[in-house]
Image (cartoon, rainbow, N blue to C red):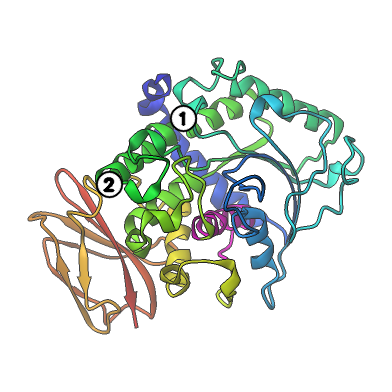
Amino acid sequence: MKATKHTVTIRLCVFALTSLIFNGLSAQTGDTVDMYYYKNSLYNHLETGNSEATASTNVGNWIARFTETTNNPKVATLGSVFGFFPQWSVPPKAHNFHSEISTPHMQKWTASWDGVKEIDLLGFVPDNFDGQAFDPSDTTNMGQAYVTKLLYLIDEWATNAPNASRRYVVYAGWPALNRYGGTNDDPSTLTATAIANWHTYGLGDYQDWMELLVTQLQAARPNLDIRLHNISKAVLMCHQNTAVKNIRPELLFEDLAPHGRSTWYFMAAVAEYIEVFGEKPPTNFEFKAEWGVDSTVTSNYQTIVDYIWMVTKGSVSIEPLNVYGQDQLLLYPNPAVSTVQIQTNLVEFNLAIFDAMGRSVVNQKDKKTIDTRDLTTGTYYVELIGKTKRQHAVLLVE
């Protein structure tokens, strides 16, 4: 794809820029964020037709659930319109497909600029099957270019509903899965190799395309706060490197689009909450059985939240494992009390351990024992860097 030829020149500068944005701007986020999204099923899998969607296949509802946790001062409001980018239009329509989030700043069901100056986060959700075959500034199979259309919308909002503190956000959902394997649109038919190839694309060319899109928007409107929400990177790496990898594909995905099930949208919402508020979801968050989240995730809630936090903070390598389900780094005992043994097929490696804030706390070379006595109780990210590959694991210290 065309986007790949830009990768070498933009990756380091984009990483530095997005890290600066996250650390410098997100920390200033207030307790209330009023949002409007041009979105599709990567944000909200609708409860229509023959789909198996529920209120839990909906990132917005999960954001509301996080904000409604006891003693959490955060508030989110959401207006939205559903469709692919050629259908996105202005003035905004206050359609709200979220039963658990309100839209107090817009007159519902009317197309109007009335009241939308209060919207301080304007989001765009690219599709996952078309645009990534093109440079973002080139015309796609849908007949338009992403950069051209998004700049038009951004300019209309900035002109008709000016808000100097508004963020303009590209929500990077996960890539299409059907081109990498599986039959009859059935996730249970996916092989480990198919999943590995999907991860490789999602963390490679697909991620590059999303970064390039945001870079081009930033270059065109340098006076505006334009950001990338790294949802795809967060959920793919969580799927690859945490307990989520043990969940069968058919329990994560409804089909090969892929439309996720409750567990998948929950993980996406963790990443989105972090990107929106600059904080982790509450530690005292409690799941309801009817929300349908897999027990592997509910029983590892804080570990998964901490890992996604580290991914969005940029302290976790984006490089995928070479083979999904193999060549893994194993740690035992885990949780640890005093020492941890490393099981790896790497002979020569550098080991680094990061805490939940992304700070390096341990560095050593070629040793297969980790002394954890000086580490405080919590969740840590372990990375082994060999000559040709990296291996990752999450470590709990009691």
Tell me if 85 is positioned left or right of 166 in this view. left
Question: Amino acid under label 2?
Answer: Thr
Which labelled disc corresponds to residue 175?
Answer: none
Whether residue 287 is visible to the viewer of this picture, yes or no, is no
Which part of the image, by quadrant, shows the N terminus? Answer: top left
Q: Position of residue 17 (x, y in %)?
A: 51, 39
Query: Identity of the amino acid at label 1?
Result: Trp
Dot 1: element: helix
Taking depth in this image into account, of 87 and 186 the one nearest to the observer is 186
Q: Quadrant of the C terminus?
A: bottom left
Q: Dot 2: few (<14), some (14–19), or many (≥20) neighbours within 10 Å?
A: some
Residue 241 highlighted magenta (yes or no):
no
* Residue marked by disc 2: 191
Label 2 or label 1, whichever comes before in sequence order: 2
Residue nearer the viewer, 337 or 221: 337
Residue 325 in view here: yes
Quadrant of res 142: top right
Q: Give the residues drawn in magenta, as a range.
A: 263-282
Residue at position x 34%, y 59% from top?
245
2 vs 344: above or below: above
Residue named by callout 1: 209
